[in-house]
Image: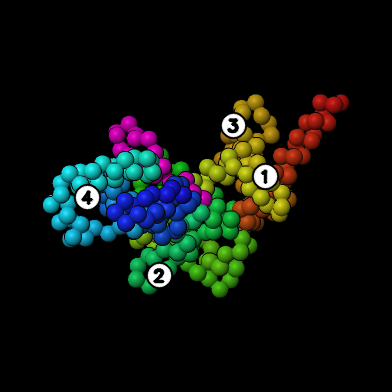
Amino acid sequence: MTSIEIYDSGKHVLIPSTWDEMSAEQIRHIFMEYDKAFRCGMSPLVFNVRVLYYLMGIKRTFRAALMDRLYPQRAMKKAENVYRICDECLAFLFSEPDSGGQVRLSFDSVKNPLPYVKCGLFRTLCGPADLLQDLTFGEFRHAAVSLNNFFLSKEIADLDECIAHLYRVKSWNENRAGRYVRNVTNNSVKRDIMRASRIPVWQKTLIMMWFSSCLRYLQNGTVIIDGEKIDMGLLFAKDEDSRSGVMGYSWNDLLIEIAKEHSVGNIERVDDEPLFSIFSIMWHNYKERKRNEKISKTR
């Protein structure tokens, strides 16, 4: 957290210095403001000032505006301080400008700031837990493929399909991953995508960036499953000479490979398995391969 002193009152306020230090409410507010700024053509500086004031709990009043008019030098000094604070304390909010000069948010947290979303007046959809811990492999696989299609096609329908597999209608029955949601079926998928299409744009953007952040972490970070630390970077090795990782495999390839092993069952059964259980199987297979490689070299 970053401590900022308000000279007028002598008070100190703390504002987040990373996305992970923000509350879910703060993250949602920033994405709403970003969507508004994008639609209204607002400059990044104005957006930053609005976010800073929100995080500091400052509200612009008629009296403050009047004082700025009466004392322009004081107002200029305050503006300089606000600009400096934005530049020093809110830089983490943005990624580097793209080729078109567009500045985008750099959200990188794996905590889900949108556990529920509304689609229409009377329908609520339930989202996954932090780091996708309660997804089935099938939900994860379909969502990842749809998100990749969206990045390639830029078609919003592909993003809607991704969200449809992540955010589900509530159910009284628990699936194998521990979520009380209805499963996606061939008969329901069109209806599910239509429901996802009704979600506000800023929420779709937040879901997309959060899911992307989880995907990156699950291919490079470290997770603990049943008390064992799993280095996901080893499972998804980028070394082309490595035979131990799954470099070049798609999620569909992985589905088929695990089904072939018969350690879980057929393809449908693998899809129903919890995502982290699949990672445990992958980690076990990785360790077995490394052990066999070591024995082979010794011989």
Q: Residues within 10 Å of mark 3 (few under 14, many from 20)?
A: few
* Secondary element at tag 4: helix
Element at label 1: strand
Q: Which residues are magenta?
A: 92-110
Within 10 Å of disc 4 (Cα), the crowding (few <14, some 14-19, many 20+) is few
The amino acid type found where label 2 is placed reads Arg
User: Does the image show residue 129?
Assistant: yes
Residue 27 vertical placement versus 86 (above, below): below
Left or right of 34 in this view: 260: right
SS state under label 2: loop
Q: State the CA–CA distance, disc 1 to disc 3.
A: 16 Å
Residue pictured at 46% horizontal, 43% vertical: 148
Q: Please tell me whether the stretch drawn in magenta is mainly helix, strand or loop.
A: loop
Residue 270 location, x and y as percent?
64, 53
Which residue, given by chain and number where applicable, does mark 1 sit on?
230
Is residue 127 one of those drawn in magenta? no
Q: Mark 4 = which residue?
A: 40
